[in-house]
Amino acid sequence: MKTTRVLFCRLFVVLYLLQMVTPSSEQFMVKGIKGPILAPFGGEVELSCQLSPPQSAQHMEIRWFRNRYTQPIYLYKEGKDLYGETTSGYVERTELLKDAIGEGKVTLRIFNVSVDDDGQYHCFFRDGDFSEEDITEVKVTGGWFPQPQMEWRDSRGDILLPTSKSHSQDRDKLFNMKMTLLLRDAHSGNVACYLRNPLTGQEERTSIVLADELFSQKKIWIIIIITLVTVLISSIAFPSVVFYCQQEQDRCCSWNSPLLVGSVIIISSVVVDVILSVCLYQRQRVPDSDPLFALDAIWAEDMIVALWVLMVFITMLISLIYFKMRDSHRDARPNLGPEAMELADHRLNS
């Protein structure tokens, strides 16, 4: 009986010593902040983790790292901060708040948050041979990060389908968004471009007024063409034809009458202008997604206006020369009878 009691005591002492030497996996757990933490771009963010059950961590190794254990972004060991082992991208950008380290709570503060800070962070505690860690996820948000949702809407709030959509990132990895919208003359009202941050739900928009901006130039050059045609008919051709018809009423309806010749000149000029304008407008143009699309459209419209101005000038010049020559021939010929005059006109026109 005594021997059994001694053996039991020895076994108890051995088990107690083994428990003191060999740490249990239940010594502590590390609990970080659950759920993604939103970090404002250019601002600062704090990541906290706590030992459970609460206990002092002053003698422990506390390591914060991203993807690799051997590349810490902050390292606390043997009661002091080891800045020399910190990853270069986080030097002078991190601080470990140890006000509650006696209860096992520490907080990592990151300054001047950049896009590269987006991702997972490991909070690692080591006490002798025992270690535990937890992971906290950080989502950087602000300005143009992450990639915003972009769409066009009309005045009724309906989404307008873009002709092209693209994005790029600058050296800070902020997004540059580009979306092209092609509107026809039939569209009325204003349009707005909406940008929405998918993390925060923050939405911004900018409106574009179409009534006076988008189609005003097209209306202007159409008015210019109509005005040029009106000037062509009213200033030179029509008065000249009327003048000659008043002097030659007996022959104003003949095939070589000034009225008929002037009408043919005007109609021919207008037809040529229309054909050339259609060919110029329907030629192979740059695609809608091309940055030079708007410039190309303006160039085509300006060329059409210039073509009409040139053709009107040529037509007016031809009409002036024709009627001037006809007037000179009329003054130079002798006073002949109707049949002789008609024969002379026939020879002139042939």
Image (tube, helix red, strand yellow):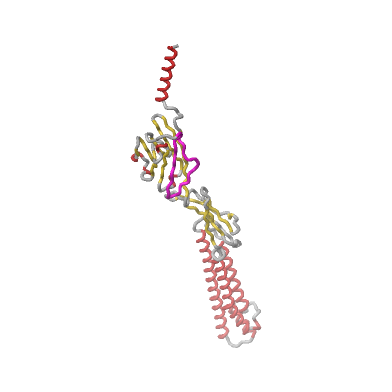
203 above or below 307?
A: above
The answer to if 45 sits in the magenta stretch is: yes
Mostly what secondary structure, the magenta segment? strand
Q: State the residue in front, 95 or 288.
A: 95
Q: Which residues are magenta?
A: 30-53
- The percent coordinates of residue 18 (x first, y second) are 41, 23
For residue 13, say whether it is visible: yes
- From this view, report whether residue 300 is shown above or below residue 13: below
Say if 334 sits above or below 264 in the image.
below
Going by the picture, which residue comes out furthest to the bottom?
A: 335
Instruction: From the top left corner, tell me how far across and down residue 103 is, in percent.
Output: 42, 37
Image quarter of the N terminus = top left
**Residue 280 is at least partly visible in this image:** no
Compare residues 301 and 342 and report the one nearer the observer.
Answer: 301
- Where is the C terminus found, in terms of image quarters? bottom right
User: Left or right: where does residue 249 sit relative to residue 96?
Assistant: right
Q: Is residue 306 magenta?
A: no
Q: Residue at x 42, y 27 (%)?
A: 23
Q: How many marks?
A: 0
From what the image shows, is residue 329 above or below residue 285?
A: below
